[in-house]
Image: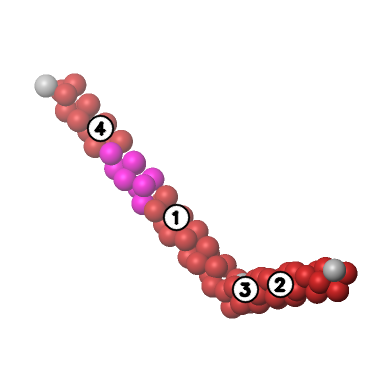
Amino acid sequence: MVAFEAGAVIGMLAIVETSVAGLGWYVVRNAATEEDVDDVAETADEAAREAAAAGYEAAEARRGAEQAHDRLDALSANT
């Protein structure tokens, strides 16, 4: 009976060890590399530049719309 219980415990420990090893392999395999980090940083920089350009274009469009509105107001006042 004791031998069976020890064997069962050893078997369970082997299962746990295999599971931990498999999990460790999965984590290491899917860990970010320095190249991945550089790619993310580059993408973030590019997105920031595009957002700044879009903000500038939006400000230009807003100024153009305000000028057009002012011209319409001036024309309406003259008629």
The stretch in magenta equals: 57-65
Q: Tags 1 and 3 in contact by the CB under 8 Å rule?
A: no
Q: Secondary structure at mark 1?
A: helix
Which amino acid, mark 1? Answer: Ala
Q: CA distance from mark 3 to mark 2?
A: 16 Å
| Residue 45 drawn above or below residue 30 | above
Which sits earlier in the primary sequence, circle 1 or circle 2? 2
Which residue is disc 2 drawn over? Answer: 15
In the image, residue 41 lies in the stretch drawn in magenta:
no
- Nearer to us in this view, 44 or 13: 13
Q: Which mark is residue 26?
A: 3
> Can you tell which quarter of the image residue 5 is in?
bottom right
Q: Earlier in the sequence, mark 3 or mark 4?
A: 3
Q: Is residue 56 left or right of residue 36?
A: left
Query: Does residue 52 appear left or right of residue 67 in this picture?
Result: right
| SS for callout 4 | helix
Magenta residue check for 63? yes
Q: Position of residue 74 (x, y in %)?
A: 21, 27
Q: Residue beneath label 1, please?
A: 51
Q: Is residue 11 visible?
A: yes
- Whether the residues at callouts 1 and 2 have beta carbons within 8 Å, the answer is no
Q: CA distance from mark 3 to mark 4?
A: 61 Å
Foreground disc of the pair 4, 2: 2
Q: How many angstroms separate mark 1 from mark 3 (CA)?
A: 36 Å
Q: Which residue is mark 4?
A: 69
Q: Residue at x 46, y 55 (%)?
A: 52
* Color theme of the render: secondary structure
